[in-house]
Amino acid sequence: MKVMTLLSRAKAGDDTAFGALVEPFRRELYVHCYRMLGSVQDAEDVLQETLTAAWRSLGGFAERASLRTWLYRIATNRCLNWLRDGERRPRTVTTFPAGVVPPEPTRTVDPIWLQPIPDALLDGLPDDTPGPEARYERREAVSLAFVTAVQALPPRQRAVLLLRDVLGYRAAEAAELLDMTEDAANALLRRARAVQFDRSPAAATSPRQRQAASAFASAIEAGDVDAMVALLTDDAWLTMPPAPLQYQGHEAIADFMRRIGFRAGRRRYRLVPTAANLQPAYGCYISDDGDPATHAHGMLVLTMADDRVSAFTRFIDNTVLPYFGLPRRL
């Protein structure tokens, strides 16, 4: 059915026609909200708000811009409202049990709430460059490093950066979407681009990379810190958002894993392979002090550099597991 026919029927109150009209954009709008908010749960909520607002205001859609652009305008501003009004779910920074003292971190950062996104939710995104102004390819723009860096930007800066450099809108179009002058949008973009974004490919696409990721997971399951370290790049990072502690390098990571990760040999892991942010990922399950029960303990996402692990990000958050089809216990 042609778009104009669907639009006419939707404006007349046909919700089935409206569903068919917006369905082609649903997945990319969801991923846009995820980039803005860093949370699959919040993105789901804001997408629903976006579609509800679009349905209610469809009669005022004057077709001066495309339907896709009109939907992105609503979604972006809903995300900004969500961030401004503090509607995000209560967050707690990871703490350690009484008596467990982590080693001195390499650096301490401001807590940033972040969740990985399943590769299954990235299916169906356009593979080609979305617009003439886009700087980032699809694979780069969903990498964990990129999404993490975006979360450190003030909300309006991240909105301009995503509209211009990821979605490819021109300066005038982005300014109109955000109800600001073009000069103001360009100023925000300059400040956002001052941040160093990782441009390296995120996914483990070669057999050697996939083998290295699997070997790293096996070393964790075996509790073999030396084998883990042998698979790291010299400048590898261990991060645990939203915990502010970060560790870089073989010695610092090995010390943390022995003392905290493996609890001096009292904790064992089982890892279930999955994929997140187009990167190798694993559902984590632990048992402590010989307990036969194996409980869910968040996720692990790997960033590969050639056939080594350049970063591993530990998420101590079980609420995201259902999005990956992972159980609460094994």
Image (tube, helix red, strand yellow):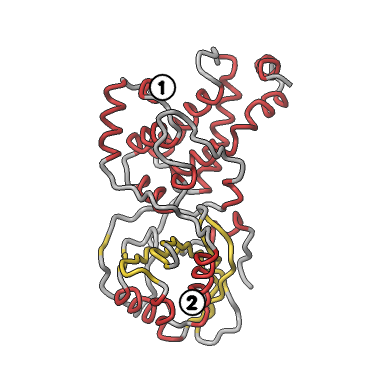
* Towards the viewer: 228 or 207: 207
> Which element is circle 2 on?
helix
Give the x, y percent position of residue 125: 57, 40
Please report the residue visible at 60 percent of the width from the left and 54 percent of the height from the top: 323
Please report the residue visible at 57 percent of the width from the left and 52 percent of the height from the top: 119
Q: How many marks?
A: 2
Q: For this view, does 285 lie left or right of residue 147?
A: right
Give the x, y percent position of residue 199: 38, 49
Q: For this view, does 224 lie left or right of residue 248?
A: right
Please give the residue where the numbered disc 2 appears in the rendered image: 220
Of the two numbered discs 2 and 1 on the same chain, state the one appearing first in sequence. 1
Q: For this view, does 115 lie left or right of residue 237?
A: right
Q: For this view, does 290 lie left or right of residue 98?
A: right
Please give the residue where the numbered disc 1 appears in the rendered image: 173
Circle 1 residues within 10 Å: few <14, some 14–19, many ≥20 = some
> Which element is circle 1 on?
helix
